[in-house]
Amino acid sequence: MALMDQLVAKAKANKQRIVLAEGTEPRTIQAADRILGDGVADIVLIGAKSEIDALVKEYNLKNIDKATIVEPENNPNAQKYADLLFKLREKKGMTREQADQLVKNPLYLGTLIIKSGEADGQVAGARNTTGDVLRPALQIIKTAPGISCVSGAFIMIMDNEAAKQYGKNGIMVFADCAVTPNPEAAQLGQIAVCAAQTAHDIAGIEQPIVGMLSFSTKGSAKHEMVDKVVEATRIAKELNPDLIIDGELQADAAIVPSVGASKAKGSTVAGHCNTLVFPTLEVGNICYKLVQRLTGGTAVGPILQGIAAPVNDLSRGCNIDEVYQTIVVTCNQAIGAKERAAAK
């Protein structure tokens, strides 16, 4: 079964409630109609009902009546959400009047619905910038416990025979490739922990093995950038003592068993990594694009990591399939977070 089929099946078996803040965006509402028809998730659409009704008629949508529609300008729960927003942001200087206005903003309203426990995740970005999507998420939902930075991972699905020897039959996780330009050691350690969660929850990798990448392997070079990766590895182990991780490792030492055995003698991680953490965004972004093109593979993402409840950002050039897949990914992130919380 293909990875996305597995994620759809898991979402159907443990249905989550996902907010689509851009409920009147054509690609988004068409993806929502498919999600509802397939029974993948419960959907909250934010937008004026008259606009939603017009889109239902225009695209002949059959399942939107199963969604919960929340109108920002005619919301019976507006005062409740405004009170919550004011309470959360009063010490940051927000006034009551500002809170009353911001609950009419779909991106803020969506995150307030999640913060209230009435939804499990949000997808937006088809018509809004990444900054606009992330700002309310960080102000209201905030980062997960022990995490102070948001990062973006890609699931790399490499179908050619040469690449299938790496990761889980050619499936690997790369991070951070999308958000934090030059993470400090503490942030890089957090990215490693989050990337392992993404590998487990989304990539179907039951035992994530994390390689902290550098241009050095186990002291073969001396530089402050190497020191950062070594310290990040130590911090990641502190954050999650059960995490299987090693670093610093060069890329070949991380994924090729013979090279790992030669360059990092005694390491049970070197040569077997399925989750790669890059020292900077520049490196990660370049690498995922090169691997995608050179292998003819698929890059699923960016999957945003580190937020206390999953919020994912679409490309403004996305298509309906990509919106559908992002909703599925968000469901699986929510499921994984609940499973970890229950295990504690």
Image (tube, helix red, strand yellow):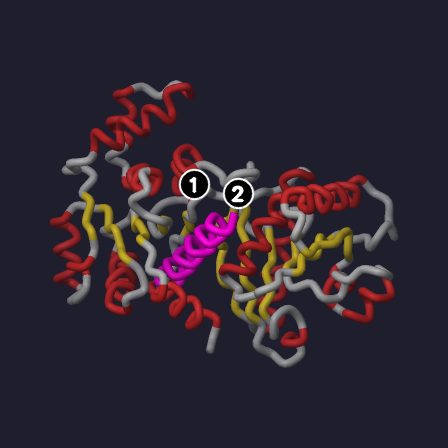
**289 displayed left or right of 27:** right
Q: Pick whichever, 327 or 291, lies toward us.
A: 327
Q: Amino acid at mark 1?
A: Leu
The single residue placed furthest to the bottom in the displayed view is 161
**SS at mark 2?**
loop
Q: Residue at x 26, y 21 (%)?
A: 97
Residue annotated with mark 2: 150
Q: Amino acid at mark 2?
A: Val
- Give residue 317's position: percent from left, percent from top: 39, 57
Say the numbered circle drawn on residue 134. 1
Instruction: Classify 261 as above or below 97.
Output: below
State yes or no: residue 340 in magenta: yes
- Give residue 217's position: percent from left, percent from top: 82, 55
- Give residue 29's position: percent from left, percent from top: 25, 58
**Pointer 1 local density, CA inside 10 Å: few below 14, some 14–19, many at least 20:** many
Residue 283 seen in render: no
**Total numbered circles:** 2
Q: Pick whichever, 208 or 232, lies toward us.
A: 208
Q: Quadrant of residue 86?
A: top left
Asked if labels 1 and 2 touch by Cβ distance under 8 angstroms, the answer is yes
Looking at the rendering, the stretch of residues picked out in magenta corresponds to 323-344
